[in-house]
Amino acid sequence: MSELLREMFSGVFALDYKDFIMYAIGLLLIYLAIKKDYEPMLLLPIGFGAILVNLPFSSVISYDGHPGVLKVLFDAGIATELFPCLIFIAIGAMIDFTPLFKNPVMIFFGAAAQFGIFATVIVAILLGYDLPVASAIGIIGAADGPTSIFVGARFAKDYIGPISVAAYSYMALVPIIQPPVIKLLTTKKERLIRMEYKESAPVSKTVRILFPISITIIAGILAPISVPLVGLLMFGNLIRESGVLERLAKSAENELANLVTILLGITIGSTMTADRFIRKDTLIILALGLVAFIFDTAGGVLFAKLVNLFLKTKINPMIGAAGISAFPMSARVIQRMATKEDPTNFILMQAVSANVSGQLGSIMAGGLVLSLVPRLLEIF
Amino acid sequence: MHNLTLGFILLAAGLFVVFFSLVLFYALIRVFNKLFPEKNE
């Protein structure tokens, strides 16, 4: 009889206090998604996945020695890097590079604001992580979820849960993270700088078509391993700009994005098992993710201030902070800050140009990390 | 120490190549805008 009872309530007996902590974390992510609107598309499935995977004998991971549904999805979509690549097609179909074509000089801020990635790698190494894991942690600073998952899947499979949660959470927290850093590094006078926006000639369709093709070729030559990232992003963009694949472009930016996002989120959640998530490293990774976003913002602002030393017509250094990949959130934050200082100051177009550049910069940085780290380990 | 040295190399090389790539992209956009202005379309 007691055997039968034990069998009936085996789930209850198998519960551990760590499982309850994971349910609380899952619920917190779901709360942030629903109540605070923080990246709900990702945080909600991740939160629910974290609950699913920590139920006793979770059959979504394995049952009777067979892989469960989330394990199958993980092996097929994350371990193979398929899901992030499909998301890149969708993102490519959503990106409009026109603001950048009209204001190409802003592209340099997309590079400066990647400083956080590399600076965080150094901090992570100082904390004892080896180069590949430190790089996967640093890439949280790309402010680009799919890139973080892509690099994490290759260099830090054990830490992919916290890395993804950090990447998406901090992207949602850009309006909270960036303003204090910007204020700390700029004077009121600098934040009041006005930037004249000259309405330039419309960009031709030829330029919009040639751009993704050329970028793919250049990136493929400079960092061949980045082709799945850059190539598929640009493929999505080419579908959009070709003008003859309207249905496919719409499918890519809606159905494909939505479907893969559902699967990606819940699969990432499935990596958050208590034994892998409740450890000191998770807290360190979350802290380092924040450090990466702070360094990104600082890198962009300080670069803008450096450029100002050589310019007659100064640029508003807050624009530099928009060079991160969190689009269009960062550009909006910068405009909001500018308006707060002076309600008649409009720098949104320049900020959007820098923000679009950030998307290019982040995938280039991701590709570089992927290609440089194995080389460095091989050579040294 | 070894990892730290590699980290600094990654920092320098990473930033350099990202800047270099974006300089190339900048030049590309300028050239494309010159070669294919909207009015010729």
Image: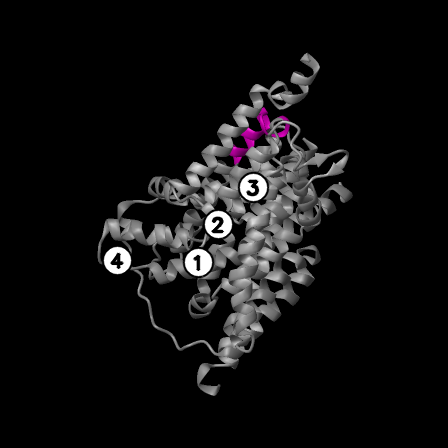
Q: Which mark is residue A354?
A: 1
Q: Earlier in the sequence, mark 1 or mark 3?
A: 3
Given the image, on which type of amino acid does mark 1 rest? Ala
Q: Position of residue A337 (x, y in %)?
A: 30, 49
Q: Position of residue A277 (x, y in %)?
A: 59, 29
User: Is residue A84 part of the magenta span, yes or no?
Assistant: no
Residue type pointed to by label 2: Ala
Tags 2 and 1 in contact by the CB under 8 Å rule? yes
Relative to A266, A106 lies left or right: left
Q: Assess disc 3: are there few (<14), some (14-19) or many (≥20) residues with their C-alpha within 10 Å of its C-alpha.
A: many
Residue occupied by mark 4: A345
Q: Is residue A276 magenta?
A: yes
Bounds of the magenta segment: A275-288
Question: Please, which chain is the residue tagged with disc 3 on?
Answer: A
Badge 4 or badge 2: first in the primary sequence: 2
Q: Residue furthest left?
A: A343
Q: Measured from the top left, where is residue A158 in percent x and y?
A: 66, 35
Q: Which residue is mark 2?
A: A113
Numbered disc in front, either 1 or 3: 3
B32 to the left or right of A372: left
